[in-house]
Image (tube, rainbow, N blue to C red):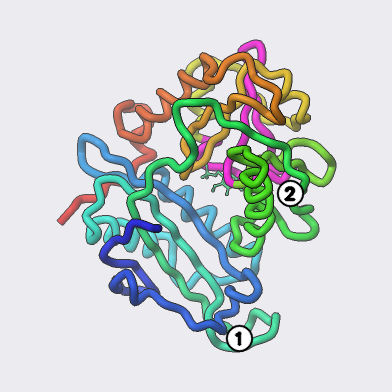
Amino acid sequence: AIPESSVIWFDGALVPWHEARVHVLSHALHYGTGVLEGTRVFATADGPAVFRLPEHLARLDRSARMLRMELPYSAEELAAATVALVAANGHRECYLRHLAFLGYGSMGLDMRHSPTSVSIASWEWPAYLPEGRGLRLMTSSWRRTDPNSVPPAAKATGPYLNSALARREATDSGFDEALLLAPDGTVSECSSENVFTVRDGVLRTTPASAGALEGITQDTLLTLARDLGAEVRIEPLLRSDLYAADEVFISGTAAGVVPVGSLDNRELPSHEGELTKQLAQAYRAAVHGEDARYRHWLTPVHRS
Ligand code: PMP
């Protein structure tokens, strides 16, 4: 169950949680015509702060453009709405879900006659993947969508069916999470996280051209790793590169930085490697505003 908050921002107003409703003939419900963002608010010494909000809103806008949807609100308006929502719900920390979708207006695939609605919901949601042990990954039998079928670069609702199928297959088979391969057989990413390897001290992660989402946590970790003096490469990986790695971890806003213990039942040398540990620590410090070098990533929420 989702821990309820008191209000949801819906098309310009704060409405009670259970009143943020849509019609069953909403276009997005039938055809997956929506774009979304998952963002986190963390506690800092100066109160709650949204982590990398402009970057999340910029990605929402890029996703909308790829679907040829027009967002009825500017990034500035959405940022103000986000901060107002977190303040109204009185969160210290929370997860935020921005959603823009085609609503009720006409049926049929033509997107031009349905209005675009925007909602922002917040709730308290601790990292949802198992912690304190290495994650058990499996290579999915489902491939990431071909960029010329449905662009994986768009964080859109419909394409999550691909992720949901892979995640379900993994959990049905007793694993924690699925690793998806791109149509060319190279590693793409997990159902909702980017993937990293460490071998001989070199950090690697897969590029957007492999069908990986341009993860904001991925970008954050690449910056943190460079600042730690690590060698960093964004390049295609094979599943055997993961089997042969010293360390593997996955990253995402919801999950955080999660060490991988095994892939396809091949155990990694350690259930939490040294660089993984350092990066997880640096990430924790950055999101909580404990490292002055990264405070520009935080948008403060001044509670009323
Ligand atoms: N890949 C996919 C498919 C995702 O859904 C997510 C979560 N948004 C990520 C990667 C990680 O992205 P981020 O770090 O921006 O949350």
Image position of 49 (left or right of 34):
left
Instruction: Specify whether residue 196 is painted magenta.
Output: yes
Identify the image quadrant of the N terminus. Answer: bottom left
Q: Position of residue 136 (x, y in %)?
A: 61, 32
In front of the other: 136 or 276: 136
Tell me the kind of residue under disc 2: Arg
Marker count (numbered): 2
Q: Is residue 202 visible?
A: no
Mark seen at residue 288: none
Label 1 crowd (10 A; few <14 / some 14-19 / many >=20):
some
- Residue identified by numbered label 2: 144
Q: Quadrant of residue 32?
A: bottom right
- Residue identified by numbered label 1: 113
Label 1 vs label 2, nearer the camera: 2
Image position of 97 (left or right of 13):
right
Residue furthest toward the right?
184
Q: Quadrant of residue 267?
A: top right
Instruction: Say what secondary structure mark 1 lies in.
Output: helix
Instruction: Say what secondary structure mark 2 lies in.
Output: loop
Q: Residue at (80%, 57%) from the top-left corner?
A: 148
Identify the image quadrant of the C terminus. Answer: bottom left
Tell me the kind of residue under disc 1: His
Q: Quadrant of residue 34?
A: bottom right
Instruction: Specify whether residue 179 is painted magenta.
Output: no
Residue furthest toward the bottom?
106
Q: Position of residue 102 (x, y in %)?
A: 56, 76
In front of the other: 139 or 248: 139
What span is colored magenta in the figure? 192-219
Q: Is residue 236 visible?
A: yes
Q: Position of residue 93 (x, y in %)?
A: 30, 45
